[in-house]
Amino acid sequence: MHQHTVAGTGSDGIRQALRARWRRRSFVCVGLDSAFDRLPESVRRKSADMGEAIVEFNREIVEATHECAAAYKPNAAFYEQHGAIGVQALIETVQYIKNKYPDIPVILDAKRGDIGNTNAGYARSAFDVIGVDAITLHPYLGSEALRPFLDRVDRGLFILVKTSNPGAGEFQDLPFGPDQRPFYEHVAETVAERWNGNGNCGVVVGAPYPDALRTVRGIVGDLPILVPGIGAQGGELQATIEAGRDSEGFGMVVNAARSIIFASSEADYAEAAAVAAERLNTSIGDIVG
Amino acid sequence: MHQHTVAGTGSDGIRQALRARWRRRSFVCVGLDSAFDRLPESVRRKSADMGEAIVEFNREIVEATHECAAAYKPNAAFYEQHGAIGVQALIETVQYIKNKYPDIPVILDAKRGDIGNTNAGYARSAFDVIGVDAITLHPYLGSEALRPFLDRVDRGLFILVKTSNPGAGEFQDLPFGPDQRPFYEHVAETVAERWNGNGNCGVVVGAPYPDALRTVRGIVGDLPILVPGIGAQGGELQATIEAGRDSEGFGMVVNAARSIIFASSEADYAEAAAVAAERLNTSIGDIVG
Protein backbone atom coordinates (compact mmCIF):
# COMPACT_ATOMS: atom_id res chain seq x y z
CA MET A 1 0.00 0.00 0.00
CA HIS A 2 1.25 3.40 -1.03
CA GLN A 3 0.35 5.95 1.67
CA HIS A 4 0.76 9.68 1.68
CA THR A 5 -1.11 12.85 2.42
CA VAL A 6 -1.40 15.92 0.26
CA ALA A 7 0.26 19.14 1.25
CA GLY A 8 -2.02 20.98 3.65
CA THR A 9 -3.65 17.76 4.77
CA GLY A 10 -6.82 17.49 6.79
CA SER A 11 -9.99 19.36 6.01
CA ASP A 12 -9.55 21.66 3.05
CA GLY A 13 -6.38 19.74 2.05
CA ILE A 14 -6.86 19.68 -1.70
CA ARG A 15 -7.86 23.32 -1.80
CA GLN A 16 -4.80 24.36 0.22
CA ALA A 17 -2.50 22.25 -1.93
CA LEU A 18 -3.88 23.84 -5.10
CA ARG A 19 -3.68 27.33 -3.59
CA ALA A 20 -0.01 26.81 -2.79
CA ARG A 21 0.59 25.97 -6.43
CA TRP A 22 -1.41 28.96 -7.70
CA ARG A 23 0.47 31.31 -5.33
CA ARG A 24 3.76 30.29 -6.92
CA ARG A 25 2.05 30.98 -10.26
CA SER A 26 1.79 27.37 -11.39
CA PHE A 27 -1.64 27.37 -12.99
CA VAL A 28 -1.79 24.47 -15.46
CA CYS A 29 -3.42 21.11 -14.82
CA VAL A 30 -1.60 18.71 -17.14
CA GLY A 31 -3.88 15.94 -18.34
CA LEU A 32 -1.90 12.70 -18.58
CA ASP A 33 -4.16 10.98 -21.10
CA SER A 34 -1.21 8.91 -22.26
CA ALA A 35 -2.72 6.24 -24.50
CA PHE A 36 0.05 3.99 -25.83
CA ASP A 37 -0.93 4.34 -29.48
CA ARG A 38 -0.71 8.12 -29.22
CA LEU A 39 2.87 8.11 -27.86
CA PRO A 40 5.77 9.22 -30.09
CA GLU A 41 7.22 6.31 -32.04
CA SER A 42 10.61 6.91 -30.43
CA VAL A 43 9.11 6.11 -27.01
CA ARG A 44 7.06 3.16 -28.22
CA ARG A 45 10.11 1.56 -29.85
CA LYS A 46 12.63 2.11 -27.10
CA SER A 47 10.67 0.47 -24.30
CA ALA A 48 10.47 -3.23 -23.55
CA ASP A 49 6.70 -3.16 -23.12
CA MET A 50 3.63 -0.97 -23.29
CA GLY A 51 3.60 -0.17 -19.59
CA GLU A 52 7.23 0.87 -19.52
CA ALA A 53 6.68 3.15 -22.52
CA ILE A 54 3.73 4.87 -20.85
CA VAL A 55 5.62 5.43 -17.59
CA GLU A 56 8.70 6.66 -19.43
CA PHE A 57 6.59 9.09 -21.45
CA ASN A 58 4.78 10.38 -18.35
CA ARG A 59 8.06 10.83 -16.45
CA GLU A 60 9.46 12.95 -19.27
CA ILE A 61 6.26 14.98 -19.47
CA VAL A 62 6.32 15.56 -15.71
CA GLU A 63 9.97 16.60 -15.77
CA ALA A 64 9.17 19.04 -18.59
CA THR A 65 6.09 20.58 -17.00
CA HIS A 66 6.37 20.42 -13.18
CA GLU A 67 7.35 24.06 -12.80
CA CYS A 68 4.08 25.34 -14.20
CA ALA A 69 1.90 22.40 -13.11
CA ALA A 70 -0.78 23.18 -10.54
CA ALA A 71 -1.84 19.54 -10.76
CA TYR A 72 -1.60 16.40 -12.87
CA LYS A 73 -4.73 14.65 -14.03
CA PRO A 74 -4.41 11.15 -15.50
CA ASN A 75 -7.67 9.82 -16.94
CA ALA A 76 -8.23 6.21 -15.90
CA ALA A 77 -9.75 5.13 -19.23
CA PHE A 78 -6.54 5.66 -21.18
CA TYR A 79 -4.72 3.27 -18.83
CA GLU A 80 -7.51 0.73 -18.33
CA GLN A 81 -7.80 0.23 -22.09
CA HIS A 82 -4.38 -1.46 -21.88
CA GLY A 83 -5.50 -3.91 -19.19
CA ALA A 84 -3.46 -4.74 -16.08
CA ILE A 85 -0.28 -3.36 -17.68
CA GLY A 86 -1.97 -0.01 -18.16
CA VAL A 87 -3.21 0.07 -14.57
CA GLN A 88 0.28 -0.73 -13.33
CA ALA A 89 1.64 2.11 -15.49
CA LEU A 90 -0.91 4.46 -13.91
CA ILE A 91 0.17 3.40 -10.41
CA GLU A 92 3.85 3.87 -11.25
CA THR A 93 3.18 7.26 -12.83
CA VAL A 94 1.38 8.52 -9.73
CA GLN A 95 4.07 7.13 -7.44
CA TYR A 96 6.71 8.88 -9.49
CA ILE A 97 4.95 12.23 -9.23
CA LYS A 98 4.18 11.92 -5.50
CA ASN A 99 7.73 10.82 -4.66
CA LYS A 100 9.44 13.49 -6.70
CA TYR A 101 6.94 16.36 -6.47
CA PRO A 102 4.84 15.69 -3.37
CA ASP A 103 3.46 19.24 -3.39
CA ILE A 104 1.77 18.82 -6.78
CA PRO A 105 -1.71 17.30 -6.36
CA VAL A 106 -2.64 14.39 -8.61
CA ILE A 107 -6.30 14.09 -9.60
CA LEU A 108 -7.56 10.78 -10.95
CA ASP A 109 -10.17 11.51 -13.57
CA ALA A 110 -12.17 8.32 -13.12
CA LYS A 111 -15.77 9.56 -12.87
CA ARG A 112 -16.69 6.83 -10.42
CA GLY A 113 -19.96 6.49 -8.55
CA ASP A 114 -21.57 3.35 -7.13
CA ILE A 115 -23.38 2.30 -3.95
CA GLY A 116 -21.58 2.83 -0.63
CA ASN A 117 -20.04 -0.60 -0.16
CA THR A 118 -18.66 -0.50 -3.70
CA ASN A 119 -17.47 3.09 -3.45
CA ALA A 120 -15.36 1.97 -0.49
CA GLY A 121 -13.51 -0.27 -2.96
CA TYR A 122 -13.13 2.54 -5.50
CA ALA A 123 -11.84 4.89 -2.78
CA ARG A 124 -9.27 2.29 -1.73
CA SER A 125 -8.24 1.84 -5.35
CA ALA A 126 -7.83 5.57 -6.02
CA PHE A 127 -6.41 6.81 -2.74
CA ASP A 128 -4.55 3.83 -1.25
CA VAL A 129 -3.49 1.73 -4.25
CA ILE A 130 -3.02 4.30 -7.03
CA GLY A 131 -2.30 6.96 -4.44
CA VAL A 132 -3.90 10.07 -5.91
CA ASP A 133 -4.91 13.15 -3.92
CA ALA A 134 -8.30 13.63 -5.57
CA ILE A 135 -10.82 11.96 -7.85
CA THR A 136 -13.74 12.94 -10.11
CA LEU A 137 -17.17 11.52 -9.20
CA HIS A 138 -20.70 11.18 -10.57
CA PRO A 139 -23.44 12.75 -8.42
CA TYR A 140 -26.29 10.46 -9.56
CA LEU A 141 -26.38 8.07 -6.55
CA GLY A 142 -26.34 10.88 -3.98
CA SER A 143 -24.27 11.66 -0.89
CA GLU A 144 -25.30 8.57 1.08
CA ALA A 145 -23.58 6.40 -1.54
CA LEU A 146 -20.58 8.73 -1.82
CA ARG A 147 -19.94 8.61 1.94
CA PRO A 148 -16.72 6.50 1.62
CA PHE A 149 -15.31 9.29 -0.55
CA LEU A 150 -16.75 12.22 1.44
CA ASP A 151 -15.28 10.74 4.64
CA ARG A 152 -11.74 10.86 3.23
CA VAL A 153 -11.04 14.29 4.70
CA ASP A 154 -7.46 14.28 3.43
CA ARG A 155 -8.45 13.76 -0.21
CA GLY A 156 -10.32 15.89 -2.73
CA LEU A 157 -13.51 15.08 -4.63
CA PHE A 158 -14.57 16.82 -7.83
CA ILE A 159 -18.25 16.20 -8.47
CA LEU A 160 -19.54 16.41 -12.05
CA VAL A 161 -21.83 19.40 -12.43
CA LYS A 162 -21.71 20.55 -16.07
CA THR A 163 -19.46 18.43 -18.27
CA SER A 164 -17.45 19.66 -21.26
CA ASN A 165 -19.03 17.51 -24.00
CA PRO A 166 -21.29 19.04 -26.68
CA GLY A 167 -24.28 16.98 -25.52
CA ALA A 168 -23.81 17.72 -21.81
CA GLY A 169 -27.17 19.43 -21.57
CA GLU A 170 -29.34 16.40 -22.36
CA PHE A 171 -29.99 15.87 -18.64
CA GLN A 172 -27.81 18.53 -17.04
CA ASP A 173 -29.79 21.44 -18.49
CA LEU A 174 -33.26 20.10 -17.73
CA PRO A 175 -35.30 22.74 -15.91
CA PHE A 176 -36.02 21.95 -12.30
CA GLY A 177 -38.07 23.12 -9.35
CA PRO A 178 -40.18 26.24 -8.84
CA ASP A 179 -37.69 28.57 -10.54
CA GLN A 180 -36.97 26.13 -13.40
CA ARG A 181 -33.21 26.32 -13.02
CA PRO A 182 -31.12 23.75 -14.91
CA PHE A 183 -30.42 20.51 -13.08
CA TYR A 184 -26.67 21.14 -12.92
CA GLU A 185 -27.25 24.24 -10.78
CA HIS A 186 -29.15 22.11 -8.34
CA VAL A 187 -26.26 19.63 -8.23
CA ALA A 188 -23.76 22.46 -7.65
CA GLU A 189 -25.88 23.88 -4.82
CA THR A 190 -26.28 20.46 -3.20
CA VAL A 191 -22.53 19.80 -3.28
CA ALA A 192 -21.64 23.22 -1.88
CA GLU A 193 -24.33 23.41 0.80
CA ARG A 194 -24.79 19.80 1.89
CA TRP A 195 -21.93 17.56 0.79
CA ASN A 196 -18.94 19.67 1.73
CA GLY A 197 -19.00 19.17 5.50
CA ASN A 198 -15.42 17.93 5.41
CA GLY A 199 -14.25 20.75 3.12
CA ASN A 200 -12.98 18.29 0.53
CA CYS A 201 -15.41 18.89 -2.34
CA GLY A 202 -14.95 20.67 -5.63
CA VAL A 203 -17.02 20.57 -8.81
CA VAL A 204 -16.46 20.02 -12.54
CA VAL A 205 -17.65 22.57 -15.11
CA GLY A 206 -16.53 22.36 -18.75
CA ALA A 207 -14.77 25.34 -20.36
CA PRO A 208 -17.12 25.35 -23.38
CA TYR A 209 -19.85 26.67 -21.06
CA PRO A 210 -18.62 29.99 -19.58
CA ASP A 211 -22.15 31.05 -18.61
CA ALA A 212 -22.58 27.85 -16.62
CA LEU A 213 -19.16 28.42 -15.10
CA ARG A 214 -20.14 31.92 -13.96
CA THR A 215 -23.40 30.69 -12.49
CA VAL A 216 -21.71 27.77 -10.71
CA ARG A 217 -19.02 30.04 -9.28
CA GLY A 218 -21.82 32.17 -7.85
CA ILE A 219 -23.33 29.07 -6.25
CA VAL A 220 -20.25 27.29 -4.85
CA GLY A 221 -18.31 30.30 -3.53
CA ASP A 222 -14.61 29.52 -3.39
CA LEU A 223 -14.80 25.76 -3.90
CA PRO A 224 -12.22 24.66 -6.49
CA ILE A 225 -13.67 24.13 -9.95
CA LEU A 226 -12.06 21.59 -12.27
CA VAL A 227 -12.38 22.98 -15.81
CA PRO A 228 -11.73 20.52 -18.63
CA GLY A 229 -12.11 21.23 -22.35
CA ILE A 230 -10.03 24.37 -22.71
CA GLY A 231 -8.60 25.05 -26.15
CA ALA A 232 -5.31 26.71 -26.96
CA GLN A 233 -7.02 29.95 -27.93
CA GLY A 234 -6.45 32.93 -25.67
CA GLY A 235 -9.97 34.23 -26.23
CA GLU A 236 -11.63 31.14 -24.87
CA LEU A 237 -9.17 31.11 -21.99
CA GLN A 238 -9.98 34.70 -21.12
CA ALA A 239 -13.73 34.05 -21.13
CA THR A 240 -13.22 30.94 -18.99
CA ILE A 241 -11.11 32.62 -16.35
CA GLU A 242 -13.28 35.72 -16.17
CA ALA A 243 -16.33 33.54 -15.71
CA GLY A 244 -14.86 31.12 -13.20
CA ARG A 245 -12.44 33.07 -11.02
CA ASP A 246 -12.97 32.97 -7.25
CA SER A 247 -12.55 35.69 -4.64
CA GLU A 248 -8.77 35.27 -4.76
CA GLY A 249 -8.68 35.69 -8.54
CA PHE A 250 -8.44 32.12 -9.87
CA GLY A 251 -9.62 29.01 -7.98
CA MET A 252 -9.79 26.78 -11.02
CA VAL A 253 -8.06 23.59 -12.12
CA VAL A 254 -7.75 24.39 -15.82
CA ASN A 255 -6.89 21.15 -17.55
CA ALA A 256 -5.10 20.76 -20.86
CA ALA A 257 -4.12 17.30 -22.06
CA ARG A 258 -3.48 16.64 -25.74
CA SER A 259 -2.38 20.21 -26.51
CA ILE A 260 0.50 19.72 -24.06
CA ILE A 261 1.44 16.05 -23.93
CA PHE A 262 1.04 15.50 -27.69
CA ALA A 263 2.36 18.95 -28.72
CA SER A 264 4.94 17.05 -30.74
CA SER A 265 4.76 13.45 -31.93
CA GLU A 266 8.51 13.34 -32.48
CA ALA A 267 11.43 12.65 -30.16
CA ASP A 268 11.28 16.29 -28.97
CA TYR A 269 7.88 15.72 -27.32
CA ALA A 270 9.10 16.70 -23.84
CA GLU A 271 10.55 20.01 -25.00
CA ALA A 272 7.39 20.68 -26.98
CA ALA A 273 5.29 19.88 -23.90
CA ALA A 274 7.38 22.26 -21.81
CA VAL A 275 6.85 25.04 -24.33
CA ALA A 276 3.11 24.39 -24.62
CA ALA A 277 2.64 24.19 -20.84
CA GLU A 278 4.67 27.34 -20.22
CA ARG A 279 2.80 29.23 -22.91
CA LEU A 280 -0.54 28.24 -21.38
CA ASN A 281 0.75 29.07 -17.91
CA THR A 282 1.85 32.52 -19.02
CA SER A 283 -1.48 33.12 -20.73
CA ILE A 284 -3.36 32.15 -17.61
CA GLY A 285 -1.02 34.23 -15.43
CA ASP A 286 -1.53 37.30 -17.63
CA ILE A 287 -5.29 37.01 -17.30
CA VAL A 288 -5.23 36.25 -13.58
CA GLY A 289 -2.97 39.29 -13.13
CA MET B 1 -7.02 -8.72 -27.53
CA HIS B 2 -9.75 -11.09 -26.50
CA GLN B 3 -12.52 -11.06 -29.10
CA HIS B 4 -15.92 -12.72 -29.03
CA THR B 5 -19.56 -12.03 -29.58
CA VAL B 6 -22.46 -12.86 -27.33
CA ALA B 7 -24.94 -15.51 -28.26
CA GLY B 8 -27.54 -13.93 -30.51
CA THR B 9 -25.11 -11.27 -31.65
CA GLY B 10 -26.01 -8.13 -33.55
CA SER B 11 -28.83 -5.82 -32.60
CA ASP B 12 -30.73 -7.10 -29.58
CA GLY B 13 -27.81 -9.45 -28.77
CA ILE B 14 -27.75 -9.09 -25.01
CA ARG B 15 -31.52 -9.39 -24.76
CA GLN B 16 -31.55 -12.55 -26.88
CA ALA B 17 -28.70 -14.07 -24.90
CA LEU B 18 -30.53 -13.41 -21.63
CA ARG B 19 -33.80 -14.74 -23.03
CA ALA B 20 -32.10 -17.99 -24.01
CA ARG B 21 -30.96 -18.39 -20.41
CA TRP B 22 -34.39 -17.55 -18.97
CA ARG B 23 -36.05 -20.05 -21.35
CA ARG B 24 -33.92 -22.84 -19.94
CA ARG B 25 -35.01 -21.58 -16.51
CA SER B 26 -31.66 -20.14 -15.49
CA PHE B 27 -32.76 -16.96 -13.73
CA VAL B 28 -29.98 -15.89 -11.35
CA CYS B 29 -27.40 -13.20 -12.02
CA VAL B 30 -24.44 -14.16 -9.85
CA GLY B 31 -22.54 -11.11 -8.62
CA LEU B 32 -18.82 -11.88 -8.59
CA ASP B 33 -17.87 -9.24 -6.01
CA SER B 34 -14.87 -11.34 -5.03
CA ALA B 35 -12.78 -9.06 -2.83
CA PHE B 36 -9.68 -10.96 -1.67
CA ASP B 37 -10.18 -10.26 2.04
CA ARG B 38 -13.67 -11.75 1.87
CA LEU B 39 -12.50 -15.07 0.36
CA PRO B 40 -12.45 -18.24 2.51
CA GLU B 41 -9.16 -18.66 4.28
CA SER B 42 -8.63 -22.01 2.57
CA VAL B 43 -8.54 -20.22 -0.80
CA ARG B 44 -6.42 -17.34 0.40
CA ARG B 45 -3.82 -19.72 1.86
CA LYS B 46 -3.58 -22.19 -1.00
CA SER B 47 -2.82 -19.68 -3.74
CA ALA B 48 0.55 -18.22 -4.61
CA ASP B 49 -0.81 -14.70 -4.87
CA MET B 50 -3.91 -12.56 -4.50
CA GLY B 51 -4.83 -12.68 -8.17
CA GLU B 52 -4.58 -16.44 -8.37
CA ALA B 53 -6.77 -16.79 -5.29
CA ILE B 54 -9.47 -14.56 -6.77
CA VAL B 55 -9.48 -16.42 -10.10
CA GLU B 56 -9.52 -19.82 -8.34
CA PHE B 57 -12.44 -18.70 -6.17
CA ASN B 58 -14.38 -17.35 -9.16
CA ARG B 59 -13.77 -20.53 -11.17
CA GLU B 60 -15.17 -22.64 -8.36
CA ILE B 61 -18.17 -20.33 -7.96
CA VAL B 62 -18.84 -20.47 -11.71
CA GLU B 63 -18.58 -24.28 -11.77
CA ALA B 64 -21.01 -24.44 -8.84
CA THR B 65 -23.59 -22.02 -10.26
CA HIS B 66 -23.50 -22.10 -14.07
CA GLU B 67 -26.60 -24.27 -14.40
CA CYS B 68 -28.84 -21.66 -12.82
CA ALA B 69 -26.87 -18.60 -13.92
CA ALA B 70 -28.63 -16.26 -16.34
CA ALA B 71 -25.56 -14.02 -16.19
CA TYR B 72 -22.45 -13.24 -14.17
CA LYS B 73 -21.80 -9.72 -12.94
CA PRO B 74 -18.35 -8.89 -11.59
CA ASN B 75 -18.16 -5.42 -10.05
CA ALA B 76 -14.99 -3.63 -11.18
CA ALA B 77 -14.36 -1.93 -7.81
CA PHE B 78 -13.67 -5.19 -5.99
CA TYR B 79 -10.91 -6.01 -8.48
CA GLU B 80 -9.49 -2.51 -8.93
CA GLN B 81 -8.95 -2.18 -5.19
CA HIS B 82 -6.22 -4.81 -5.58
CA GLY B 83 -4.41 -2.84 -8.29
CA ALA B 84 -3.07 -4.38 -11.50
CA ILE B 85 -3.22 -7.89 -10.01
CA GLY B 86 -6.92 -7.47 -9.36
CA VAL B 87 -7.57 -6.21 -12.88
CA GLN B 88 -5.69 -9.19 -14.30
CA ALA B 89 -7.81 -11.49 -12.12
CA LEU B 90 -10.95 -9.85 -13.52
CA ILE B 91 -9.73 -10.40 -17.09
CA GLU B 92 -8.89 -14.06 -16.40
CA THR B 93 -12.23 -14.62 -14.69
CA VAL B 94 -14.16 -13.27 -17.66
CA GLN B 95 -12.03 -15.25 -20.13
CA TYR B 96 -12.70 -18.40 -18.12
CA ILE B 97 -16.46 -17.87 -18.21
CA LYS B 98 -16.58 -16.94 -21.90
CA ASN B 99 -14.37 -19.87 -22.92
CA LYS B 100 -16.22 -22.46 -20.89
CA TYR B 101 -19.77 -21.08 -20.93
CA PRO B 102 -19.99 -18.78 -23.95
CA ASP B 103 -23.79 -18.69 -23.76
CA ILE B 104 -23.83 -17.05 -20.33
CA PRO B 105 -23.59 -13.25 -20.65
CA VAL B 106 -21.09 -11.46 -18.44
CA ILE B 107 -22.01 -7.95 -17.30
CA LEU B 108 -19.26 -5.68 -16.02
CA ASP B 109 -20.72 -3.54 -13.26
CA ALA B 110 -18.42 -0.56 -13.72
CA LYS B 111 -20.82 2.40 -13.79
CA ARG B 112 -18.66 4.28 -16.28
CA GLY B 113 -19.54 7.52 -18.00
CA ASP B 114 -17.19 10.16 -19.45
CA ILE B 115 -16.95 12.30 -22.59
CA GLY B 116 -16.97 10.52 -25.97
CA ASN B 117 -13.25 10.25 -26.61
CA THR B 118 -12.72 8.82 -23.13
CA ASN B 119 -15.70 6.49 -23.32
CA ALA B 120 -14.05 4.97 -26.40
CA GLY B 121 -11.22 3.92 -24.06
CA TYR B 122 -13.63 2.53 -21.46
CA ALA B 123 -15.51 0.61 -24.17
CA ARG B 124 -12.25 -0.90 -25.41
CA SER B 125 -11.33 -1.81 -21.83
CA ALA B 126 -14.66 -3.49 -21.07
CA PHE B 127 -15.48 -5.16 -24.38
CA ASP B 128 -12.11 -5.85 -26.02
CA VAL B 129 -9.65 -6.22 -23.13
CA ILE B 130 -11.78 -7.61 -20.30
CA GLY B 131 -14.16 -9.13 -22.83
CA VAL B 132 -17.56 -8.73 -21.20
CA ASP B 133 -20.87 -8.78 -23.06
CA ALA B 134 -22.41 -5.80 -21.27
CA ILE B 135 -21.61 -2.91 -18.94
CA THR B 136 -23.43 -0.58 -16.54
CA LEU B 137 -23.29 3.16 -17.34
CA HIS B 138 -24.12 6.56 -15.83
CA PRO B 139 -26.61 8.67 -17.82
CA TYR B 140 -25.37 12.09 -16.63
CA LEU B 141 -23.29 13.07 -19.70
CA GLY B 142 -26.01 12.14 -22.18
CA SER B 143 -26.18 10.03 -25.33
CA GLU B 144 -23.71 12.09 -27.35
CA ALA B 145 -20.98 11.15 -24.86
CA LEU B 146 -22.14 7.52 -24.64
CA ARG B 147 -21.98 7.06 -28.44
CA PRO B 148 -18.87 4.76 -28.32
CA PHE B 149 -20.93 2.42 -26.11
CA LEU B 150 -24.25 2.85 -27.95
CA ASP B 151 -22.50 2.05 -31.24
CA ARG B 152 -21.35 -1.35 -30.00
CA VAL B 153 -24.38 -3.14 -31.38
CA ASP B 154 -23.10 -6.54 -30.27
CA ARG B 155 -22.82 -5.54 -26.59
CA GLY B 156 -25.35 -4.59 -23.95
CA LEU B 157 -25.58 -1.36 -21.95
CA PHE B 158 -27.45 -1.06 -18.67
CA ILE B 159 -28.08 2.61 -17.89
CA LEU B 160 -28.57 3.63 -14.25
CA VAL B 161 -32.14 4.75 -13.69
CA LYS B 162 -33.03 4.15 -10.02
CA THR B 163 -30.19 2.69 -7.99
CA SER B 164 -30.52 0.28 -5.04
CA ASN B 165 -28.92 2.42 -2.31
CA PRO B 166 -31.01 3.95 0.52
CA GLY B 167 -30.17 7.50 -0.57
CA ALA B 168 -30.85 6.91 -4.27
CA GLY B 169 -33.60 9.50 -4.33
CA GLU B 170 -31.46 12.56 -3.54
CA PHE B 171 -31.33 13.45 -7.25
CA GLN B 172 -33.15 10.54 -8.87
CA ASP B 173 -36.50 11.37 -7.24
CA LEU B 174 -36.45 15.11 -7.90
CA PRO B 175 -39.71 16.17 -9.54
CA PHE B 176 -39.37 17.22 -13.14
CA GLY B 177 -41.28 18.84 -15.95
CA PRO B 178 -44.95 19.76 -16.28
CA ASP B 179 -46.23 16.58 -14.62
CA GLN B 180 -43.57 16.65 -11.86
CA ARG B 181 -42.49 13.07 -12.39
CA PRO B 182 -39.29 11.93 -10.68
CA PHE B 183 -36.08 12.45 -12.64
CA TYR B 184 -35.41 8.71 -12.95
CA GLU B 185 -38.60 8.25 -14.95
CA HIS B 186 -37.35 10.85 -17.38
CA VAL B 187 -34.05 8.97 -17.68
CA ALA B 188 -35.87 5.67 -18.30
CA GLU B 189 -38.03 7.26 -20.98
CA THR B 190 -35.03 8.85 -22.68
CA VAL B 191 -33.13 5.55 -22.79
CA ALA B 192 -36.10 3.58 -24.13
CA GLU B 193 -37.29 6.13 -26.67
CA ARG B 194 -34.12 7.83 -27.84
CA TRP B 195 -31.01 5.86 -26.94
CA ASN B 196 -32.00 2.36 -27.94
CA GLY B 197 -31.71 2.70 -31.72
CA ASN B 198 -29.32 -0.24 -31.81
CA GLY B 199 -31.48 -2.37 -29.52
CA ASN B 200 -28.64 -2.80 -27.05
CA CYS B 201 -29.91 -0.81 -24.05
CA GLY B 202 -31.27 -1.95 -20.73
CA VAL B 203 -31.76 -0.06 -17.47
CA VAL B 204 -30.90 -0.51 -13.79
CA VAL B 205 -33.58 -0.34 -11.08
CA GLY B 206 -32.85 -1.41 -7.51
CA ALA B 207 -34.99 -4.13 -5.90
CA PRO B 208 -35.68 -2.01 -2.78
CA TYR B 209 -37.93 0.18 -4.94
CA PRO B 210 -40.68 -2.07 -6.38
CA ASP B 211 -42.94 0.91 -7.16
CA ALA B 212 -40.18 2.46 -9.23
CA LEU B 213 -39.60 -0.91 -10.88
CA ARG B 214 -43.27 -1.14 -11.87
CA THR B 215 -43.28 2.39 -13.25
CA VAL B 216 -40.04 1.85 -15.17
CA ARG B 217 -41.33 -1.42 -16.65
CA GLY B 218 -44.32 0.52 -17.90
CA ILE B 219 -41.99 3.05 -19.51
CA VAL B 220 -39.34 0.80 -21.09
CA GLY B 221 -41.54 -1.99 -22.42
CA ASP B 222 -39.57 -5.21 -22.72
CA LEU B 223 -36.07 -3.76 -22.32
CA PRO B 224 -34.07 -5.89 -19.88
CA ILE B 225 -33.91 -4.45 -16.37
CA LEU B 226 -30.90 -5.18 -14.18
CA VAL B 227 -32.15 -5.45 -10.60
CA PRO B 228 -29.50 -5.29 -7.87
CA GLY B 229 -30.15 -5.29 -4.15
CA ILE B 230 -32.36 -8.33 -3.80
CA GLY B 231 -32.43 -9.99 -0.38
CA ALA B 232 -32.82 -13.67 0.37
CA GLN B 233 -36.45 -13.22 1.49
CA GLY B 234 -39.12 -14.70 -0.72
CA GLY B 235 -41.54 -11.86 -0.03
CA GLU B 236 -39.23 -9.21 -1.34
CA LEU B 237 -38.46 -11.40 -4.32
CA GLN B 238 -42.15 -11.85 -5.07
CA ALA B 239 -42.79 -8.11 -4.92
CA THR B 240 -39.80 -7.46 -7.17
CA ILE B 241 -40.76 -9.95 -9.85
CA GLU B 242 -44.40 -8.96 -9.85
CA ALA B 243 -43.42 -5.33 -10.23
CA GLY B 244 -40.77 -5.81 -12.88
CA ARG B 245 -41.86 -8.68 -15.12
CA ASP B 246 -42.10 -8.04 -18.85
CA SER B 247 -44.63 -9.29 -21.41
CA GLU B 248 -42.93 -12.70 -21.46
CA GLY B 249 -43.13 -13.03 -17.68
CA PHE B 250 -39.66 -12.09 -16.44
CA GLY B 251 -37.21 -9.86 -18.37
CA MET B 252 -35.04 -9.03 -15.38
CA VAL B 253 -31.42 -9.62 -14.45
CA VAL B 254 -31.91 -10.28 -10.74
CA ASN B 255 -28.51 -10.02 -9.15
CA ALA B 256 -27.38 -11.69 -5.93
CA ALA B 257 -23.76 -11.45 -4.87
CA ARG B 258 -22.77 -11.93 -1.26
CA SER B 259 -25.72 -14.22 -0.43
CA ILE B 260 -24.37 -16.68 -3.01
CA ILE B 261 -20.62 -16.31 -3.27
CA PHE B 262 -20.08 -15.88 0.48
CA ALA B 263 -22.82 -18.31 1.55
CA SER B 264 -20.07 -20.15 3.42
CA SER B 265 -16.71 -18.77 4.49
CA GLU B 266 -15.30 -22.29 4.87
CA ALA B 267 -13.78 -24.73 2.41
CA ASP B 268 -17.30 -25.80 1.33
CA TYR B 269 -17.97 -22.35 -0.17
CA ALA B 270 -18.62 -23.73 -3.68
CA GLU B 271 -21.20 -26.26 -2.48
CA ALA B 272 -22.81 -23.56 -0.36
CA ALA B 273 -22.90 -21.22 -3.37
CA ALA B 274 -24.52 -23.94 -5.47
CA VAL B 275 -27.21 -24.48 -2.83
CA ALA B 276 -27.86 -20.75 -2.43
CA ALA B 277 -27.99 -20.12 -6.17
CA GLU B 278 -30.27 -23.09 -6.80
CA ARG B 279 -32.57 -22.05 -3.97
CA LEU B 280 -32.85 -18.52 -5.38
CA ASN B 281 -33.32 -19.90 -8.88
CA THR B 282 -36.15 -22.17 -7.72
CA SER B 283 -37.78 -19.29 -5.85
CA ILE B 284 -37.64 -17.09 -8.93
CA GLY B 285 -38.88 -19.93 -11.14
CA ASP B 286 -41.84 -20.58 -8.84
CA ILE B 287 -42.86 -16.94 -9.01
CA VAL B 288 -42.28 -16.63 -12.77
CA GLY B 289 -44.41 -19.75 -13.21
Image (cartoon, coloured by chain):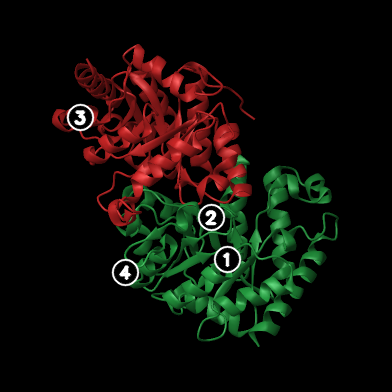
Chain colours: A green, B red
Residue type pointed to by label 1: Tyr
Q: Position of residue B145 (x, y in %)?
A: 57, 47
Label number found at residue A194: 4
Discs 3/2, front:
2
Hey, which residue is sitting farthest left in the picture?
Answer: B235
Q: Chain of mark 3?
A: B
Establish whether labels 4 and 3 are both on one chain: no
- Which residue is disc 3 drawn over? B237
Establish whether labels 3 and 2 are both on one chain: no
Secondary structure state at the residue bearing disc 4: helix
Q: Chain of mark 2?
A: A
Q: Residue at x 41, y 70 (%)?
A: A200
A185, above or below B136, in the image: below
Q: CA distance from mark 4 to mark 3?
A: 35 Å
The picture quadrant where one finds residue B187 is top left
- Which residue is disc 1 drawn over? A209
Discs 3/1, front:
1
Establish whether labels 3 and 1 are both on one chain: no
- Which residue is disc 2 drawn over? A168
A91 lies left or right of B228 = right
* Labelled pair 3, 1 in contact (Cβ < 8 Å): no
